[in-house]
Amino acid sequence: MVKTNHSGSRLVATLTVLFAVLTGVYLLIGGIWLVAVGGSWYYPIAGAVMLAIAWLFWQRKALALWLYALLLLGTGAWSVWEVGFDFWALTPRLDVLFFFGVWLLLPFVYRRLTQPSAGAAPALGAVLVFTVIGLAWAVFNDPQEISGTLKTDTQTFSAATSTIPDADWPAYGRNQEGQRYSPLKQINDKNVGQLKEAWRFQTGDVKRPTDPGEITNEVTPIKIRDTLYLCTAHQQLFALDAATGKQKWKFDPRLDTNPSFQHVTCRGVSYHEATADNAGPEVVSDCPRRIILPVNDGRLFAINADNGKLCASFANKGILNLQTNMPVTTPGMYEPTSPPIVTDTTIVIAGAVTDNFSTREPSGVIRGFDVNSGKLLWAFDPGAKDPNLIPGDEHHFTPNSPNSWAPAAYDAKLDLVYLPMGVATPDIWGGNRTPEQERYASSIVALNATTGKLAWSYQTVHHDLWDMDMPSQPTLADITVKGETVPVVYAPAKTGNIFVLDRRNGKLVVPAPEKPVPQGAAKGDYVTPTQPFSDLSFRPKKDLSGADMWGATLYDQMVCRIIFHKLRYEGIFTPPSEQGTLVFPGNLGMFEWGGISVDPHRQVAIANPMALPFVSKLMPRGPGNPMEPPKDAKGTGSESGIQPQYGVPYGVTLNPFLSPIGLPCKQPAWGYISAVDLKTNEVVWKKRIGTVRDSSPLPLPFRMGMPMLGGPISTAGNVLFIGATADNYLRAYNISNGDKLWEARLPAGGQATPMTYEVNGRQYVVISAGGHGSFGTRMGDYIVAYALPDEAQ
């Protein structure tokens, strides 16, 4: 080697040794801590080796390169042993070491070594090349993805005859069965790549200073004839020309928010058409076609679909007060955020109740109102001894009854409405819950839509301590089982289970055996011995381990591993604890309010499960954490962070499981798009969806699989559409094999479910792009429509 003595050489040597020493000390000390809490021995060994390399390099011995080559080679072998050829799991284990190896091979670095070894530099170079080859292989052989193809010659099964015109999308899920499937096929897998923006509308409704952080734009518009109807975050209602996006009229309910509201959102509106057969002449003349609009302060509006004026014959001049007989009427504590079910006679409405505030909150009562007059017809109060008892003027519904905040589904033939139920709040400690509060919590409840009487219920989580409520609209379909057509309900759960029940009687169609779960609840509480686990599920096949921890580099990955081993975690349903419990699937759930899409003809379901752990930590009462709320106590305006849970022995903190630099501690993917053959319940394909372009400091288009809020839709054109991801895109995929066919950059976050319709012979795909406050996506006020250019139709 050439001997050099100038100051530049000394600086290079100093920097090289300094980096190796700092890395070695960090890995050695942190690694000893990790081993002490039950983690991997790799990190202290790697730290000791790095210190040896630093010393050898300072002594100008070429043995430093040999030792570093062995370290990098050993790290690669260990990494593949832990996670296989998963590119994004391998990267943090290898990135820093790889680039330091490249640095060591730079001529002005390695030539300062005075005791040469002919093979040292080539050996290290070979290991670096081998590392690149391994990572390249991992890019194209993702072990988390499933590649398959739905049979193109699959028998087409007959579905129930629909009364909905093919061109329309008249309900939140297109039909009240919640299928999110359109028979349109002008846009198909052959031409979807040619989609262009057709029109864009801005509502002008943006975040206000008085809003909480949880302000969201989650609406799926509905379309009837030539008009699109949609609500904004503050429940302003717009009617747009479906062909041009031009505003026809606007109605503003003048929602007055404050930062204590847990939500400011509107997922959609409902539609009803009165006729001489189902309404009196006063209703037909006053408001024959009406939009039913839920508002977050506990009001329900009936608005003339033709002109945007209140329907005077409904309730109090078009306004129904849903706070009547509520035990607590504080605005924002009871919020109807999802569109109600509307039958020929009845509006079935439920609402969200603030999570984790106190034991004195509104009721989660479900009610049926006359669709024409707004008169209360029935009530189903899940926390009452007699759920159907309607209180008199001096009484009220049961405080803290389990609520149903997500959209419901309806079978008109059976006259049954299927409600996804939440848990009685406070959610994360349940030692004081009554048997009535437990009875229907985290269940699917089937009610007669005309009478409110219970038909059946099925509980998906017993004594729920994890906020594992039923988060999305159930989907109804007729499926062939052993040669017989069975009417079923698909109920996606936060746990990743999809429960499949005969919608006539609630009997399981797909088995969901009870299995033992971890025990040892907090003082004063208990955990049930078993929980149901559906055979149709996206839940993880194995519990998390230290090997599943992630980071940008081996430095923060090691910290995540330490944090992981310090938390209580024994798999799904590990009880909340003062130590801090890792909750996986997390509170956000593997399924959220977007639900699934079902093609009833091909008998295929499209799902978009997530995988993002949370951490819950119980906080015992004491100074600064009183049992009873202060006089001026208000809601937190968020479902994460510190949650007071007044009235029970513990408050709680709920947060995503993140590293100190804010990255998820669980390795990606955090989100997928997938197809299930419903005849076999087989997952045919599963792909990562979403990039970090709008989440990372640099706009990098890395496809890692992102968390989502929103759901998919499918069409007869063999195309599925989905926004939802934490980057600002609307995407289209081939239903048969999961190939991405098209994507469009949105002007803001697309945390909404799209829809599609046809007008004047042209098919459109529409999505709300307004962002989601607590999800961290770009906020806006956009409604964007896409269609094929004239020459491609």
Image: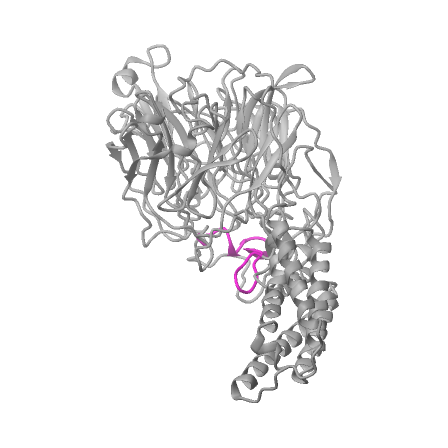
Q: Is residue 279 above or below residue 148?
A: above
Residue 337 horizontal/vertical position (percent): 42, 38
Residue at screen point 56% across, 86% down: 10
Q: Is residue 135 above or below residue 66?
A: above
Q: Is residue 98 above or below residue 786?
A: below
Span highlighted in magenta in the image = 636-664
Per the picture, the main secondary structure of the magenta-coloured stretch is loop
Q: Is residue 394 above or below residue 344?
A: below
Examine the structure image and report whether residue 78 is included in the region drawn in magenta: no
Q: Nearer the viewer, residue 305 or 763?
A: 763
Does residue 441 show up? Answer: no
**In the picture, residue 205 is in which quadrant?**
top left
Residue 148 horizontal/vertical position (percent): 62, 33
Residue 314 horizontal/vertical position (percent): 32, 25
Residue at screen point 51% across, 41% down: 399
Residue 522 horizontal/vertical position (percent): 68, 54
- The image quadrant where one finds the N terminus is bottom right
**In the picture, residue 549 is in which quadrant?**
bottom right
Left or right of 148? Residue 388 is: left
Q: Nearer the viewer, residue 462 or 44?
A: 44
